[in-house]
Amino acid sequence: MGVSETEAIVLRTYKLAEADKITVFLSQHSGVMRGVARGARRLKSKFGASLEPFTLVSLSYYEKEGQELVAIRQAEILRSFFELSKNTEVVIALEYIGGLILEFAPPHEPNEKVFRMLRACLEAIAATPEALRQVTRYCEVWLLKLSGFLPDLRACVNCKKSFSEKNEKTYLGIDGALRCDRCAHQADLPLGVETFAQLRSTQRLTPAEWSLANSKASETSAKELSQVTQRLITRALERLPRGRATVE
Ligand SMILES: [Zn+2]
């Protein structure tokens, strides 16, 4: 409690009263938080453009015991990503990703991996906006992984046979588990060799590396991978997340 400082990524903002803003942000060490920035909507606010969505900021805030909203005292831009806001497709995808983070990352639950992953994804999109679809997919896979909804990619859930990354046809069940050719159920979603290799490689590559490695992936595997994350996310949230149809 008291005054804290953190790096954070702004996810959302809402208007509050006449001149204030409520900011929802992903902090580096304390997970998703919500704070009030007094006077942030005034023309000459000390916050300037620092609280725009997807800005990486250094935040100073005051936290009072028992209160959900913190008071944002200062916000300094570390990286604005302002250039991304001119691209409508990127804005739609980022809104979707921001929404997913709010779904998968519970408030005040420290998760530095989610923070680092989101920051790396933003950097990757800023460097290569054409990789938007791949980075969105990568982000989905990692949010599933970090919240425990990604199946074991190393072995068949049934017979425990180890999967090889090179030449493995796998099957994703409606139970969210991954099975080998011999154990597959009828309703399982078949994943081609290329799709499974892509899925596995998310675990050892950064978003920029992964997008580059998959920039020439076939339409079939891109579609399969989209079905995989859609099935797993829908299973985790018990519904299709908002904006998923739009980003496809
Ligand atoms: Zn098996």
Image (cartoon, helix red, strand yellow):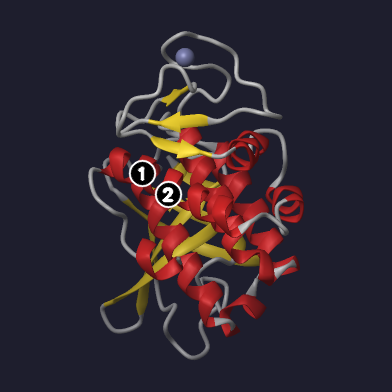
Is residue 139 rendered to the left or right of residue 105?
right
Q: Residue furthest bottom?
A: 43
- Determine crowd level at label 1: few under 14, some 14-19, many 20+ residues with C-alpha closer than 10 A: many
Check disc 2 and report the residue beneath it. Answer: 227
Q: Amino acid at mark 1?
A: Arg
Residue under the image location 51 percent in, 71 percent down: 51
- Determine crowd level at label 2: few under 14, some 14-19, many 20+ residues with C-alpha closer than 10 A: some
Is residue 151 rendered to the left or right of residue 58?
left
- Whole-percent x and y of residue 44? 52, 88
Using the image, determine if residue 195 lies above or below residue 241: above
Q: Amino acid at mark 2?
A: Gln
Residue under the image location 28 percent in, 53 percent down: 240
Mark 1 vs 2: CB contact within 8 A: yes
The label shown at residue 164 is none
Is residue 145 rendered to the left or right of residue 165?
left
Check disc 1 and report the residue beneath it. Answer: 231
Using the image, determine if residue 240 lies above or below residue 87: above
Q: Quadrant of the C terminus?
A: bottom left
Task: From the viewer's side, name the closer residue of 38 and 119.
Answer: 119
Counting every numbered tag in the picture gives 2
Residue under the image location 42 percent in, 83 percent down: 41
Q: Residue furthest left?
A: 238
Q: Is residue 128 visible?
A: yes
- Whole-percent x and y of residue 63? 40, 48
Using the image, determine if residue 231 lies above or below residue 156: below
- Whole-percent x and y of residue 88? 52, 81
Cα separation between marks 1 and 2: 6 Å
Determine the secondary structure under disc 1.
helix
Q: Which image quadrant for residue 40?
A: bottom left
Q: Quadrant of the N terminus?
A: top left
Residue under the image location 48 percent in, 42 percent down: 143
